[in-house]
């Protein structure tokens, strides 16, 4: 489970963001804070994996909080969630190690895609060891591969259908064939295959081959 600290000066916005986070499987909100001082106190009491961080806070900026954390040697991951859209702030966030930057206002789908990308990155780091170039490429692309959101779908594709296929894969405990996905999602095999190929191109689905004794290998799909 990925523990999240939500930091926003507006209590209502913080609650909305926390509710969004709670809707994404694998994430939970450990605490909320509305100032830099409150955030530091919260982190002292409850270390977290990820901070969803507003930039405009009453006592200091969100990036000031990041700089304090880095000086303390804390490498807690940060996704900026802010109305600040000037390039200087975006550049500063990047240089201080923010993994992503989400500009307000945003939709649940927009935040979910960032969180799902972060989850993929988190899983990639869990195993440790060494990585081949394709694995390095996948790690660096995890946060930019934001899934197939409504604005990214090719013409003729449905966001609702993509979500159904995505949900089936994410909840599966083993790789699935296109037929397996079709049955669980209530789709035709042809439709399931089309969406699986789309999700594979985004980098969110891994295709593997299972070889039997005879005939062509079976395509198997899993969420990454």
Image (spheres, grey):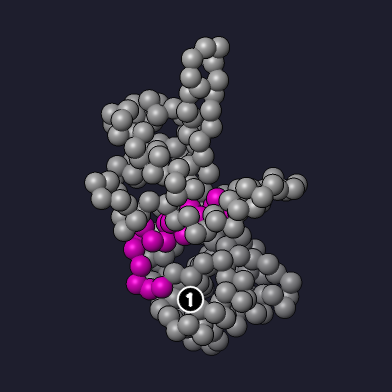
Where is residue 42 drawn, in percent x and y? 60, 70
Q: Is residue 187 above or below residue 121?
A: above
Q: Is residue 105 magenta?
A: yes
Give the side of residue 82 with respect to residue 64, left or right: left
Tell me which residue sits at (57%, 74%) in the image: 94
Tell me which residue sits at (36%, 60%) in the image: 108
Q: In which quarter of the view is residue 167 placed?
A: top left
Q: Is residue 132 above or below residue 63?
A: above
| Most distant residue in the front direction | 215
Where is residue 66 drawn, in percent x and y? 61, 76
| Most distant residue in the left direction | 156
- Considering the numbered disc 1 on the image, is that residue within a helix, a strand or a loop? loop
What secondary structure prevails in the magenta region? Answer: helix
Tell me which residue sits at (67%, 70%) in the image: 44
From where the camera sits, is residue 25 visible? no
Where does label 1 land, which residue? 54
Q: In which quarter of the view is residue 5 placed?
A: bottom right
Q: Is residue 131 above or below residue 8?
A: above
Magenta-tinted stretch: 103-121
């Amino acid at each position: 489970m990925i523990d999240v600290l939500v930091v926003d000066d507006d209590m209502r916005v913080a609650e909305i963001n926390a509710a969004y986070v709670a809707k994404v499987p694998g994430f939970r909100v450990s605490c909320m804070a509305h100032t830099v001082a409150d955030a530091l106190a919260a982190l002292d009491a409850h270390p977290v994996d990820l901070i969803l961080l507003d930039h405009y806070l009453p006592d200091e900026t969100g990036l000031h909080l990041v700089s304090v954390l880095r000086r303390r040697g804390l490498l807690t991951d940060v996704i900026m969630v802010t109305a600040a859209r000037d390039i200087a702030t975006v550049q500063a966030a990047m240089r201080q190690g923010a993994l992503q930057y989400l500009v307000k206002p945003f939709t649940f789908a927009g935040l979910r895609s960032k969180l799902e990308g972060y989850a993929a990155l988190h899983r990639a780091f869990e195993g440790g060891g060494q990585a081949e170039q394709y694995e390095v490429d996948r790690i660096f692309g995890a946060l930019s591969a934001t899934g197939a959101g409504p604005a990214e779908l090719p013409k003729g594709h449905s966001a609702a259908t993509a979500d159904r296929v995505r949900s089936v894969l994410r909840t599966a405990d083993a790789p699935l064939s296109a037929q397996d996905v079709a049955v669980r999602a209530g789709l035709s095999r042809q439709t399931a295959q089309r969406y699986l190929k789309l999700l594979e191109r985004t980098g969110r689905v891994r295709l593997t081959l299972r070889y039997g004794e005879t005939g062509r290998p079976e395509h198997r799909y899993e969420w990454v």
